[in-house]
Amino acid sequence: MHSVPKVAMISGGNRGIGLATARQLLAEGWYVSIGCRQTEISDLSKGESVSVFYYNAQDPESEKQWFSDTISKFGRVDALIINAGIMTPGTVIDATDDEYQQIVEINVTSPWRLSKLVWPALKKSGNGKIVIMSSLSGKRVASAGSGLYSMSKFALTGLTHALRLTGAEDRIRVTAICPSYVATDMAKSITDLSPEKMTQPESIATLILTVLKLPFEAGVAEIPVHWNVEPMY
């Protein structure tokens, strides 16, 4: 008798870490629901094990629709992987009101709303997981120019811990992945570091898969990752 495949929702799963994670989960027999603004992903949009739905972190109705479509297609959700986010370089003094509102909405508020939406399904799963893509910038402020981004990621790490404590009685584990530079479009746009030296998206995906495989009694709060050596903590 075959077991029912587990189902993961991945925000921003059309490229970078999200896409690498989707590929590894599919290879492990998971069903995957990808939420993203560009829904054309040619190599993942076919077959019963994966669906791509519209999701915009600045549009709460799209969050509700994505979750509803996922339940309609797969009937359950066992893991929520919050991967979508933006980096707006700049100090907290130079940031405009619009920049502040946008980065908080995308990096913090939408993850909070998604977690609330999916929570009952994760509780029903019996060993539900939320994996949140935070950052080492959510643990320390490395420069003034990364201040606005760091502020949003500190809040996201805080959300992780708030959800983690809330989930203890509901058998939901919540983990923050906190990497430094990963060879994605975001990192390539803000550093001259060679992509070959950065942590690869596939390596982060392997960490996410490892967290999802853990039993309930093995809760992991944070996983900090650096491509080299982290000097600040």
Image (spheres, rainbow, N blue to C red):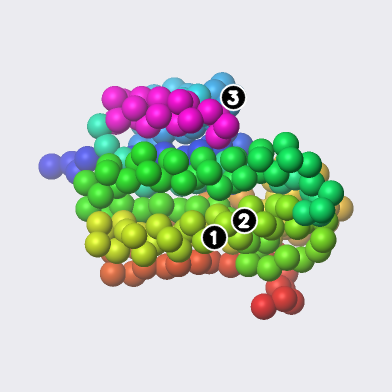
Q: Residue 171: horizontal and vertical position, in percent? A: 26, 59
Per the image, the residue denoted by label 1 is: 157
Foreground residue among 16 and 133: 133
Q: Residue 226: horizontal and vertical position, in percent? A: 67, 66
Q: Is residue 171 above or below residue 53?
A: below
- Magenta-colored stretch includes residue 60: yes
Q: Residue 156: horizontal and vertical position, in percent? A: 55, 55
Amino acid, disc 1: Thr
Per the image, the residue denoted by label 2 is: 153
- Magenta-colored stretch includes residue 217: no
Count of marks placed on residues: 3
Which circle's residue, 1 or 3, is located before the other in the chain?
A: 3
Q: Residue at x 58, y 67 (%)?
A: 224
- The numbered disc on residue 38 is 3
Q: Is residue 17 left or right of residue 207?
A: right
Marks 2,1: beta carbons within 8 A: yes
